[in-house]
Image (cartoon, grey):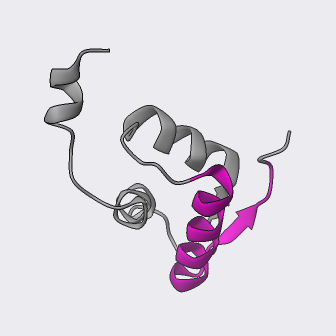
Amino acid sequence: MSIARWAIRPVGTAREFLASELQSARYGDIVSVKAAVEAARRDAPYLQDTDDELMKKIIELARELGLAVLFDIRD
């Protein structure tokens, strides 16, 4: 990994990233914690939140958006 890649990393919080990922979900949809964490790790490697911190943010956002949460992170 080059230093230049980290120097121009995107700016944003985990909550902002997750909100953008969940924006297309409809009320009552199911959110997979495992898939959301994997997406964060893949598409936003600059995030320094732990998996548990990401899971907490996913739950909070899901509650606000009226989504169900699938707790499959340990599978």
Q: Quadrant of the N terminus?
A: top left
Report the residue at 34% width, 61% height from top: 13
In the foreground, 64 or 54: 54
Residue 63 point in image, percent of width and height: 61, 82
In the foreground, 73 or 24: 73
Report the residue at 36% width, 41% height from top: 46
Residue 9 point in image, percent of width and height: 21, 39
Is residue 41 inside the magenta stretch?
A: no
Residue 30 as seen in the image, left or right of residue 58: right
Q: Which residues are magenta?
A: 50-72
Most prominent secondary structure in the magenta stretch?
helix
Report the residue at 45% width, 61% height from top: 22
* Residue lying farthest to the front in this orientation: 3
Residue 23 point in image, percent of width and height: 38, 65
Q: Quadrant of the C terminus?
A: top right
Residue 2 as seen in the image, left or right of residue 43: left
Position of residue 33 relative to residue 63, above or below, is above
Position of residue 21 relative to residue 62, above or below, is above
